[in-house]
Image (cartoon, grey):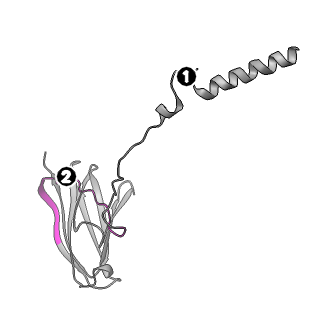
Amino acid sequence: MNYILFACALLLILGVLCTGCIQGSSPASEVITINQTPVPLATAPNEALTVTPPILSLGNQYLQNSYSFVNQSDRVTEQIRIADPSWAIEFNITPLSYNIQDCWFEMKITNLDTHANQTFSWTYLNDTFQQYPMYTTGSYQIDMTGNLVLVKLDVAKRLP
């Protein structure tokens, strides 16, 4: 008889749990529907998402020059001495070919005192105007390579 009473109590508890009486609401009222359409990050699958940093104000130039890269083996090296810890690198790219996918540019900046380096690059997917703030004084070597581009480079003190 104890087994029958235990089985009935168990069935009663299961029935209460299934109807949702213990939770205080019916399961149908807990269904949440969200009618939102997803927002795409880019308008087309091949289009890059670019974030434009704020434009920096530049003052006295450490280096201001234009460089033309007409084939993949072109390489230019410049050395400069930076005296102010608040400086920036700015470059503007002009493609020299109608087939813009063949155009590219890369610049490696090495601090000759600490041997720390940074690489900045441009391909047809990026913005042609780029600026980068820098924060360390010292002697620097700038190694540039590219293909079918005209580069206007400006290394200058940043203004507040």
| Residue displayed at 47% across by 31% down | 29
Q: Is residue 56 magenta?
A: yes
Disc 2/disc 1 C-alpha distance (Å): 53 Å
Q: Nearer the viewer, residue 120 or 83?
A: 120
x and y, in percent, of residue 98 in the image: 23, 85
Left or right of residue 16, residue 138 in this image: left
Q: Neighbour class for label 2 at 10 Å: few (<14), some, many (≥20)?
A: few
Residue 82 sits in which quadrant? bottom left
Q: Secondary structure at mark 1?
A: loop
Q: Which residues are magenta?
A: 45-65
x and y, in percent, of residue 108 in the image: 34, 65
When the figure is inspected, residue 138 is found, relative to residue 146, above or below; the finding is above
Which residue position is annotated with label 1?
23
Residue 110 sits in which quadrant? bottom left
Q: Return the disc, 2 or 1, that comes first in the chain's sequence.
A: 1
Using the image, tell me which numbered label, if any, was put on residue 54: 2
What predominant SS class does the magenta segment belong to? loop
Q: Nearer the viewer, residue 157 or 149?
A: 149
